[in-house]
Image: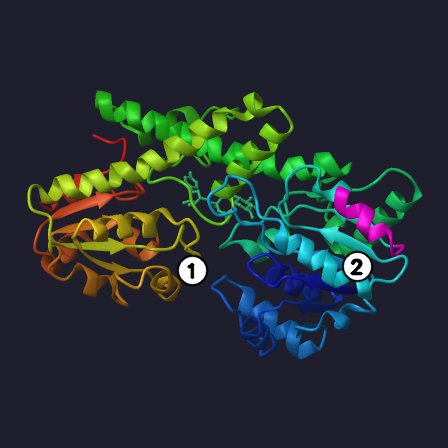
């Protein structure tokens, strides 16, 4: 099939490359020339494992092209909209201006019978509104939310847990379904579960999945707060409750909490949308989920300042990690960068590092001191803070690390180290919700 993908960020670039991998002819469109130039050259404009390989094979096969000119979508039958829906500054609600702009730019180039497919995360009710506009040119709209995780985006796109289609009732809906089935034929052939539903349900599936995941993380972080008040160990607690298959161990890692371009803004946008619908009470708990999450960042800042005791000015703290999670260079709403920034504002000499996210972090906070390697960050540090659990930080050797620093205090804000091993090497170890 001939497919266009509007928006070539973390979602769209991966989607475009994956669709080409499935054998389709794909044109990716973005307004950012720099991004398009990189993609055209077959290189990824951000860090995502497996994406460079997919891009270069798609581009060299000729099946994958990139453009800044919307006119180039003409000739495609299916048009995916994969632009961002960030939080509006100073508000909880999502900013839909990129989605609106994508539809505005697409409309003049659509042909009757084309299918526009929304992938962006939007407040429930958006698809129904956009469908009316798309129908004015004889095209149809489907909503097909995306559940990929950064760091596993290629795998999640090519081998999704499930596909969800939100389509209208009737013949045009059936035609939309048939087109999507054709797009995803090879994925469906592997018995991937498919849920076909209406627009509102499809939109809500996405938002409620992220709300559930955020709630799961905040639940265990709330238990960490109780553990801190009682001397209990939240990691053992998570293991024990996680053995219950109804609960499950995944997404029960207590620590500095969730960040990124999705979970935080999605729970806020959901709250805002529910309030608009007069149903704010139904998801009022998400405000608590958000507060619990942000309190963990305060706790990490407290642990660092307490470790330095009185005079914190100019004292060196090594901050290991800046991305919102490992295997990503994304620093959007990153707990790590937030904590580093707050420590810096307290006058502490923050020396931060990350395998992939330094350039992005520097653009947001140029005031911090950034170094390329963990060793440089650790050199003469009085306190070490692990705040993004990259493999190389999890694997640090307590003895060797001890020879670099000037004080053996480590704060493990992701609960990924073995406290006994670090204590045995003479370190003061502090985790979150761990004695
Ligand atoms: C999340 C969802 O997991 C995806 O399914 C969804 O498609 C995506 O948002 C999206 O809406 O586009 P992502 O933001 O890539 O994916 O990252 P996650 O793996 O969900 O992690 C989110 C945050 O939660 C990270 O900061 C991570 O460190 C934190 N986390 C995760 C915890 O603090 N504890 C855990 O146990 C798990």
Main secondary structure of the magenta stretch: helix
Please state the horizontal and vertical placement of residue 83, each as a whole percent of the image: 62, 56
- Determine the residue located farthest toward the front in the rendered image: 90
Q: Residue at the spot x=73%, y=59% of the render?
A: 104
Residue sitting at 64 percent across and 59 percent down? 15
The residue sitting at 59% across, 73% down in the picture is 36
Residue 50 % position (x, y)? 53, 64
- To which residue does mark 2 refer? 78
What range is drawn magenta here? 129-138
Left or right, 301 with respect to 338, comes to left
Is disc 2 surrounded by few (<14), some (14 to 19) or many (20+) residues within 10 Å?
many
Give 174 or 33, whichever is nearer the viewer. Answer: 33
Q: Position of residue 168 (x, y in %)?
A: 83, 40
395 over 195 or under it: above or below? below
Q: Is residue 127 left or right of residue 281?
A: right
Q: Which numbered dot is residue 329?
A: 1
Q: In terms of image quadrants, where is residue 416?
A: top left
């Amino acid at each position: 099939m001939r497919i266009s993908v509007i928006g070539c960020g973390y979602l769209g670039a991966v989607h475009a490359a994956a669709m080409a991998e499935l054998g389709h002819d794909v044109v990716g469109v973005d307004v950012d020339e720099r991004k398009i130039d990189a993609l055209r050259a077959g290189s990824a404009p951000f860090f995502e494992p497996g994406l460079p390989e997919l891009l270069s094979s798609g581009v060299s096969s000729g099946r994958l092209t990139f453009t800044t000119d919307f006119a180039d979508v003409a000739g495609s039958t299916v048009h995916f909209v994969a632009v961002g829906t960030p939080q509006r500054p100073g508000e909880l609600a999502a900013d839909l201006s990129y989605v609106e702009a994508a539809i505005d730019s697409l409309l003049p180039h659509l042909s009757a019978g084309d299918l526009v497919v929304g992938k962006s995360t939007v407040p429930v009710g958006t698809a129904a509104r956009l469908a009316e506009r798309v129908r004015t040119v004889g095209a149809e709209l489907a909503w097909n939310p995306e559940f990929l995780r950064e760091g596993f985006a290629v795998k999640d796109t090519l081998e999704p847990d499930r596909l969800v289609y939100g389509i209208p009732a009737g013949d045009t809906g059936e035609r939309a379904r048939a087109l999507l089935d054709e797009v995803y034929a090879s994925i469906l052939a592997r018995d991937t579960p498919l849920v076909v539903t209406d627009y509102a349900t499809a939109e809500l599936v996405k938002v409620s999945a992220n709300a559930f995941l955020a709630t799961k993380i905040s639940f265990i972080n709330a238990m960490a707060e109780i553990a801190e008040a009682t001397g209990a160990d939240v990691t053992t607690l998570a293991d024990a409750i996680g053995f219950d298959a109804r609960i499950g161990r995944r997404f029960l890692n207590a620590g500095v909490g969730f960040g990124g371009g999705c979970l935080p803004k999605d729970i806020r946008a959901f709250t805002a949308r529910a309030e608009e619908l007069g149903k704010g009470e139904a998801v009022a708990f998400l405000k608590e989920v958000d507060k619990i999450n942000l309190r963990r960042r305060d706790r990490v800042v407290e642990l660092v300042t307490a470790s330095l005791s009185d005079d914190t000015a100019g004292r060196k703290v090594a901050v290991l990690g800046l991305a919102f999670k490992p295997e990503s260079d994304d620093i959007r709403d990153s707990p790590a960068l937030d904590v580093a920034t707050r420590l810096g504002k307290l006058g502490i000499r923050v020396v931060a590092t990350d395998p992939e996210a330094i350039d992005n972090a520097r653009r947001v906070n140029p005031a911090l001191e950034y170094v390329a390697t963990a060793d440089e960050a650790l050199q003469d540090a009085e306190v070490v803070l692990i705040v993004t659990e990259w493999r190389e930080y999890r694997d640090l050797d307590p003895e060797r690390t001890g020879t670099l620093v000037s004080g053996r205090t480590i704060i493990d804000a992701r609960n990924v180290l073995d406290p006994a091993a670090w204590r045995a090497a003479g370190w003061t170890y502090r985790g979150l919700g761990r004695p």
